[in-house]
Image (spheres, grey):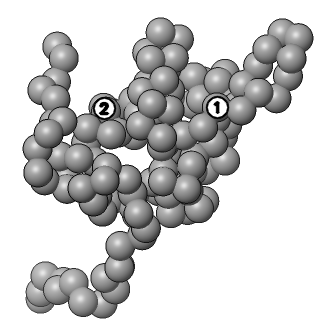
Amino acid sequence: MKSKSFDGMACSIAGVLEAIGDRWAVLILRDLSLGLSRYEDLRRSTGVTNATLSDRLKHLEDHELIERRRYQTNPERYEYVLTREGPGHHPGDAGARCRWETSGRFPGTPGRRSNSSIEKPDTR
């Protein structure tokens, strides 16, 4: 069942969800942020079908979160990398770029809260 589109909603979270797409895209972005870049490596790591992986890569490319680069000409083979607009374009920073502006871009990494500011439950 196809999820509802968030396109046009004036909400930053809805904008991020629209650009990312679905659960498979989140796993693809995770793997790219961890250093995987080739189609077969992404397919093997996520367990996604070829048709779904191809569709999600195109979606992420259309939203300028990833870039496709040819690394072999005969036969043509491509690798995928996060763009500067893509979430977590620095290894280990996946998911940190959840701020969305009206331009529809991920303009930078939002400030982070220290774990020490989170109250821990009393376990006594």
At x 43%, y 67%, the residue is: 108
Give the percent coordinates (x, y) of residue 63: 41, 37
Residue 77, above or below 106: above
At x 57%, y 22%, the residue is: 43
Give the percent coordinates (x, y) of residue 121: 13, 82
Left or right: residue 74 versus residue 92 is right
Q: Mark 2: which secondary structure?
A: loop
At x 85%, y 22%, the residue is: 72
Q: On the rendered image, what quadrant is the C terminus found in?
A: bottom left
Give the percent coordinates (x, y) of residue 94: 47, 56
Question: Label for residue 22?
Answer: 2
At x 35%, y 39%, the residue is: 20
Which picture quadrant has residue 45? top right
Q: Mark 1: which secondary structure?
A: strand
For marks 2 and 1 on the same chain, the one whose residue lies earlier in the sequence: 2
Closer to us: 102 or 88: 102
* Amino acid residing under circle 1: Arg
Left or right: residue 68 versus residue 74 is left
Left or right: residue 110 versus residue 91 is left
Q: Which residue is mark 1?
A: 68
- Local packing at callout 1 (Cα closer than 10 Å; few below 14, some 14-19, many 20+) is some
Residue 21, above or below 121: above
